[in-house]
Structure formats: structure tokens, C-alpha cells
Image (spheres, grey):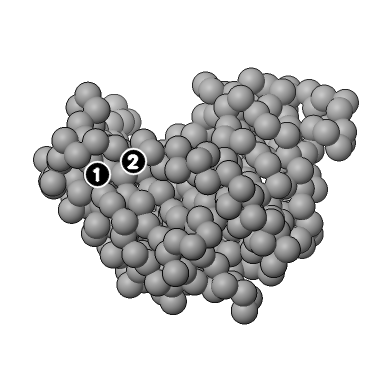
Amino acid sequence: MKNALIVLLAAALAVVLGLYTWMWLGMYDMGADSPHWKATVSMLTMMRERSIEMHAASVTVPGDINDPAVILKGAGQYAAMCAGCHLAPGVSDSEIRPGLYPQPPNLSQVRVDPRQAFWVIKHGIKMSAMPAWGFSHDDATIWSMVAFLQKLPGMTPTEYQANVAKAPPDEDMGPMDPGAMMGGGHAHDHGGAPDAQTGSMPGMSGMDMGGAGMAASAAGASADQHGHDEAFADAGRADGVPAAEVVAADFQSALQRGDRAAALALLAPRVRIREGGETQDRSAYAGHHLDADIAFLKTAQITLRERRSRMQGAQAVVTSVSDVHGGAHGKPVAVRSKETLTLTRTGAGWTIVAVDWTSAPLPVGEGT
């Protein structure tokens, strides 16, 4: 009996040492594009689900989870932080989602338990792409997201966009106006073509391309020419950072020729893109607005008026001012667009860490 026990212990030790050696030698493929073994998936899934159930059991659901104001706040939070991975009604994929393993659930199609949703959002999930939002968001904000998740499944794309458009501003997000984050009046339709109300190009968010609004904007520009000139007076000083200007030119060229991969390759992983009062991260821009920008620029005529660059601390700032002529829904579009790129030098060269697009109607008599 004693000898049998010794043999069993020695065999168990050999298995443990063998497994450790196998891991230490790097033989296990940690690539996200190499799925786990089925047995590993089953074990990890069981462990994850049981852990969430146990830890969430003591969570108390607040009484205001069905409050319309709480739900609207959650809509804005979801659009800003979650939709890139967990999708939205009418959206089947995003730039980042195909490369995630395990795949995050499509929350526009799956109903989640509110207690478990709160726990997961607050604490995250180890060894996955799910962050612990509790480090940067208070419980009330997290509960607003949970409240919205209870209403999300079954929403139509129009209902989703309407909720996001009405979401209140939040201090830890970019402004949420009627044109923000897939809202009804945004300059993109998130499907690769201009929507029914607006034009679609970098820096044109918030501009009404519906005819009367455009004419009014043009009239306003004519009446306030001095203010328009001042808006573009800070285009930058010609101190000169030629290499950064090359990156700016390459970025614009990639957008114009419809090369998504080339455009995204120039954007840093944590880039911030500001357009029409809305700030997007890389995945949000890639998943929705990039295609709309490409669609508009494919047929637009662009005349570069000036491009200037300067060093600002350790970063380079490149400002480009262009006249853009295009069309949206059979109506002509003529604007002066200003693009300001902030770039940081890496071992591979300059990379874009911030993009700011603005535009205004062309002054009457110019750019024709």
C-alpha cells in the first residue's frame, strides 16, 4: 500500500513537472488567433460562469434601474465604451471584434442578468478584453449601463440611435449632442455612405446638408467673413517637421483612395479623434465613421490650401487646410476643412495620437 502511494505521488509530481516544463519552454501558443483546446474552453467557461454567479449573488439591484433618465445616461456610456466590442443594433461587426478571443457577446441580441452585468462591468474578466471599469467609473454610472443593457436587445437601429442622441453629457466622455455616437444627425450613417440628412467627411459633423440649412450656413459665412478667417488663422507656424508632414499627407491619401489598412496603420492604438464635438477612440472610428469618410472622399475634389507643422514639446503638430467640393444626396457640398494632427515619434517614425477635424462653408466667391 505504501509503495502504491509513493508511485501515485511520483506520477502526479512527474505530470506537474512535465506540464510546468511544457509551459516554461513556451510550447503553448498564446496567440489570440489560435483557439484553446475544447477541454480548456469547457473548463474556463465553467470557471468563469460559476465565479460570476457566486460573486454577483450579493449585488443589490437599485430601484431606479428602469428610470428613463438612467437608461439614457447608460445609452451614451454604452455607445462610447462598449459598442466597439459588443456591437449595436444593425451592426454586425467592428474593426476590433474579429481579433478578440474569446469573442465578446453581442449585447444587442443577448439579455444579461443585471447583477451579473454590474459585477462584470465593474470588475472585468481576467485574461480577456473585458476591462474593470470600476477603476474609472462610479457605481451609479455602471448601473446606468446595466439599465440600458436591459432595454438594448430588441431595439431597432433607429431606436438605438435615438437613445444615444438624447444621452446627456458626461464628464468622463466626449460631448453627447444630437450628432454624437451614431445619433440621428451625425455626419455619418455608419454604413459606409452619407445618411439622409447630412454630408459625410472628416470635419463635417454637425453641418446640415439638407439644403435650407446649408444655404443658411453659407449666408452666415458671408455675413461673418472676418470670424471665418480667424477660425483658420491658427493653422500653425512653418517651423517645419517634414517627416510629420509626410505622415499627414499619407493619412489623407489613404482616406482618399479608400485604403483602410494604410489609414489605420498611421493611427496610434490610443489615438483620439475629435470631430463635430465628439471624441472617438480608434476602434469606434474604424468600426463606423472611417467607411463613411472614405465613401465621401472617394468622389470629392480636394484642394490643399496650406499645410504647416511645428514642434510642441516632444510632439509634432501638423495642420492642413483644404477646400473640399463634393455632393450629398444630389446637393453640392463646398467647405473649407481644417485637419490638425498631433504626432508622437516612435522607433518606427511618427504616429498619429490625436486628430481634430473642423469645417465651415466656403466663403462666398472662394474655392469655385
Give the number of the disc on residue 241: none
Q: Quadrant of residue 187?
A: bottom right
Q: Amino acid at mark 1?
A: Arg
Mark 2 Cα shell of 10 Å, populated few (<14), some (14-19), many (≥20): many
Task: Please identify the quadrant where the N terminus is shown.
Answer: top left
Instruction: List x then y, in percent, for residue 319.
Output: 31, 44
- Please, is residue 215 above or below residue 279 in the view? below
Would you say the residues marked 2 and 1 are in contact, meaning their CB atoms lie under 8 Å apart?
yes
Q: Which residue is mark 2?
A: 235
Foreground of the two, 278 or 191: 278
* Position of residue 192 in the picture relative to residue 306 (left or right): right
Residue for point 45% across, 55% down: 336
Q: Quadrant of residue 328?
A: bottom right
Look at the numbered disc 1 and give the secondary structure of its residue: strand
Q: Which residue is mark 1?
A: 308
Mark 1 Cα shell of 10 Å, populated few (<14), some (14-19), many (≥20): many
Foreground of the two, 304 or 143: 304
Look at the numbered disc 2 and give the secondary structure of its residue: loop
Instruction: List x then y, in percent, for residue 198.
Output: 64, 63
Q: Amino acid at mark 2?
A: Ala
- Please, is residue 56 above or below residue 356 in the view? above
Foreground of the two, 29 or 205: 205
Instruction: List x then y, in percent, for residue 189.
Output: 61, 64
Residue for point 38% across, 38% down: 233
Residue for point 79% across, 32% down: 70
Instruction: List x then y, in percent, for residue 341.
Output: 32, 43
Task: Please identify the quadrant where the C terminus is shown.
Answer: bottom left
Disc 2 or 1, which lies upstream in sequence?
Answer: 2
Distance between the alpha carbons at the discs numbered 2 and 1: 7 Å
* Position of residue 316 in the picture relative to residue 217 (left or right): left
